């Protein structure tokens, strides 16, 4: 295959080369609108953001001055308040991914194994339902539940089990709960497809060879769901690390993560260049996470691709 | 090696009866096939014996022990699936070693036995390969090695050849049968392919709509089908409307339209009954061959050739016999001329080679 591509003469038209690049499809032009949209509304703005991140910092100035410096990044990695935010962000996103996986896997497994089509649709609707409401509305719902005067604290105090309200909100716990609530459907949806694609005969073969239900799960089902686990946790990690609304509302600006800094630098202080630099670090963190996961995925997938 | 016995085993899904109460016994070392069209209950039966499906009723015994409520891992079975179910995240060695690892066999012993198993199935040196690097036939061999290494009391095979191409299927058919008779392992084989069942089995249970239609040795099933379903399902058959005119010495005299015919007697029939005559196409003698044949159980008729097709090893004729269509297959020999369409030809068959079914 590669050999065949190598023999393509370089005099090929752009259209032909694009076609080869897009997998040899004859209808390559069908992807052009999406390609153009992506280019104009994603690649260009992100690139310009990256560009100003290495520009001389001038408050209130957005346009590039073409005066390149590493100042913004030096500032980020030398001030504790910023690099600690990066560490906090990574820790928060990892924890959310872990919690979501722990509670999402059993749910996804149950839905995947439900054979009754009616019941299956019902479960799917329940999961998707959680994604229908706007996030801000859902977070206000969580505040009603978890605030100092919220349902949980009120009932516990009324029951006489505690005298002072538990600190459930405007702290790390609150942010984790908010993010788990938001990302759980993504995890479950990533897992359902993979678990469903594991042929039941694999588990049965393991059972017939002497594995108990438990052993068959850990030796067969779980390793084979690894692609879904990796995809799901990666998705959850990426959503969590870049979330601004949840740390803002559930953390009450007390849980300072990278997106909060970005917002403050840009919206409150007008330091576009520095805000952009934080954004670049955030983006790089996500990309590094993807790469590490990909490496790990290749190992766990055993010879599969 | 064990026996398998099912007693009044049944399975219903809601209103649907997947298997009506069925009893049968598979002897030690026997190659027993469950043969039938899809939805006949053969796979359900196998899966109940394996322990993957809880029965609605009845008892399953393996080697005389009641295993009805035992989980699959404690039944001492080995099963090969239609898709082979090779674990895709493990290489061939780990796949085959799986059963021994579950039994906590020592590592050096596992290595020795896996090597021996690979040797046995002709895949020495395949240890490090993964499922995606194996052909269908190789996966099949790995699946068998993985099962046989645990020395199961019974071997369950669920349509193991249906995913292979025709040539390989033929090859594997004989290979599996050879391996089975060498190991003398009790084998329960589920298939919808009558050819596989006839070639490989010691006995066959033909199943239809959740019931066992007939149990018998391959020649019994083929030559003396007990019902219209079995007749039509196994091989090709002429089924002709006849009426019984006389009975003597285990042979029935019949009227086929305005001609006389004969077949083996069936105990359920008496003179005057109408019946279905079952006659395999290869039992029909045609033209010269019909005239040359002799014997007191021979019945002679005439027919008109409607058309014929050349099939290589034989020529297939469609004949009109007193208004009913009869298919005859005549072996293709160099000294035998093809009978032209439209010709009136003598034909004959031996009463022993024809059966009767009550209508």
Image: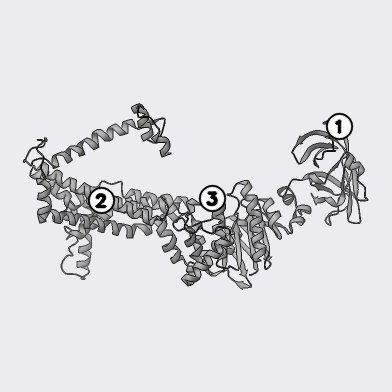
For the residues tagged 3 and 1, is the chain the same? Answer: yes
Using the image, tell me which numbered label, if any, was put on residue A288.
2
Res A27 quadrant in image: top left
For the residues tagged 2 and 3, is the chain the same? Answer: no
Using the image, tell me which numbered label, if any, was put on residue B343.
1
Please rate how many residues cluster around mark 3, counting C-alpha atoms within 10 Å: few if below 14, some from 14 to 19, many from 20.
few
Q: Is residue A104 visible?
A: yes
With B302 as the anchor, is B132 left or right in this view? left
Q: Position of residue A242 (x, y in %)?
A: 22, 49
The subunit letter for the residue under badge 2 reads A
Quick check: A270 above or below A190?
Answer: above
Question: Which residue is more in the foreground, A57 or A187?
Answer: A57
Type of colouring: one colour
Using the image, tell me which numbered label, if any, was put on residue A182.
none
* Disc 2 secondary structure class: helix
Q: At 79% from the left edge and 37% from the top edge, which residue is drawn?
A: B318
Q: At 82% from the left edge and 48% from the top edge, which residue is drawn?
A: B275
Q: At 60% from the left edge and 68% from the top edge, which residue is drawn?
A: B153
């Amino acid at each position: 295959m590669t050999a065949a591509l190598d023999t393509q003469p370089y005099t090929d038209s752009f259209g032909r080369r694009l076609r080869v690049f897009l997998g040899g499809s004859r209808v390559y032009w069908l992807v052009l609108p999406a390609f153009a949209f992506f280019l104009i509304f994603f690649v260009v703005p992100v690139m310009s953001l990256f560009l100003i991140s290495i520009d001389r910092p001038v408050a209130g100035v957005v346009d590039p001055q073409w005066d390149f410096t590493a100042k913004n990044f030096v500032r980020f990695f030398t001030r504790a308040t910023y690099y600690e935010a990066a560490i906090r962000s990574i820790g928060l996103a990892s924890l959310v991914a872990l919690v979501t996986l722990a509670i999402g896997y059993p749910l996804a497994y149950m839905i995947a194994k439900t054979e009754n089509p009616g019941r299956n649709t019902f479960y799917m609707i329940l999961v998707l339902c959680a994604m229908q409401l706007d996030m801000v509305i859902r977070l206000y719902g969580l505040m009603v539940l978890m605030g100092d005067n919220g349902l949980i604290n009120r009932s516990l105090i009324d029951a006489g089990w505690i005298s002072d309200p538990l600190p459930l909100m405007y702290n790390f716990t609150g942010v984790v709960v908010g993010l788990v609530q938001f990302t759980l459907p993504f995890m479950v949806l990533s897992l359902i497809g993979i678990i469903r694609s594991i042929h039941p005969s694999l588990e049965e073969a393991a059972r017939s060879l002497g594995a108990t239900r438990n052993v068959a799960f850990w030796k067969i089902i779980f390793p084979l769901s690894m692609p879904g686990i990796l995809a799901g946790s990666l998705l959850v990690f990426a959503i969590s690390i870049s979330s601004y609304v949840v740390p803002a509302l559930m953390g009450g600006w007390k849980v300072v993560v990278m997106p909060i800094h970005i917002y403050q630098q840009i919206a409150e202080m007008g330091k576009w260049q520095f805000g952009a630099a934080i954004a670049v670090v955030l983006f790089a963190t996500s990309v590094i996470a993807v790469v590490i996961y990909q490496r790990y995925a290749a190992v766990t997938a055993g010879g599969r691709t | 090696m064990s026996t398998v016995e099912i007693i009044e085993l049944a399975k219903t899904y809601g209103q649907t009866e997947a298997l009506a109460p069925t009893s049968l016994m598979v002897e030690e070392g026997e190659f027993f096939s469950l043969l039938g069209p899809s939805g006949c209950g053969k796979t359900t039966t196998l899966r109940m014996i394996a322990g993957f499906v809880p029965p609605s009723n009845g008892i399953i015994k393996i080697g005389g022990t009641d295993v009805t409520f035992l989980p699959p891992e404690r039944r001492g079975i080995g099963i090969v699936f239609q898709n082979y179910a090779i674990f895709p995240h493990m290489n061939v060695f780990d796949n085959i070693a799986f059963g021994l690892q579950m039994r906590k066999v020592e590592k050096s012993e596992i290595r020795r036995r896996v090597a021996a198993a690979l040797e046995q199935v002709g895949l020495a040196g395949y240890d490090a390969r993964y499922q995606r690097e194996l052909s269908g036939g190789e996966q099949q061999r790995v699946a068998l090695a993985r099962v046989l290494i645990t020395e199961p009391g019974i071997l369950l095979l669920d349509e193991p050849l249906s995913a292979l191409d025709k040539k390989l299927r033929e090859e594997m058919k004989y290979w599996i049968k050879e391996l089975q008779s060498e190991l003398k392992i009790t084998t329960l084989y589920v298939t919808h392919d009558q050819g596989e069942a006839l070639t490989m089995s010691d006995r066959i249970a033909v199943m239809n709509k959740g019931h066992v239609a007939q149990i018998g040795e391959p020649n019994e099933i083929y030559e003396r089908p007990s019902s219209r379903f079995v007749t039509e399902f196994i091989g090709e058959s002429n089924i002709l409307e006849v009426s019984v005119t006389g009975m003597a010495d285990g042979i029935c005299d019949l009227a086929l339209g305005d001609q006389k015919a004969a077949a083996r007697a069936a105990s359920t029939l008496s003179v005057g009954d109408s019946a279905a005559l079952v006659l395999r196409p290869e039992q029909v003698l045609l033209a010269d061959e019909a005239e040359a044949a002799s014997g007191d159980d021979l019945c002679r008729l005439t027919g008109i050739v409607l058309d014929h097709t050349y099939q290589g090893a034989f020529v297939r004729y469609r004949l009109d016999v007193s208004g009913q269509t009869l298919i005859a297959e005549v072996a293709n020999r160099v000294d035998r001329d093809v009978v032209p369409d439209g010709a009136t030809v003598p034909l004959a068959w031996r009463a022993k080679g024809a059966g009767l079914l009550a209508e």
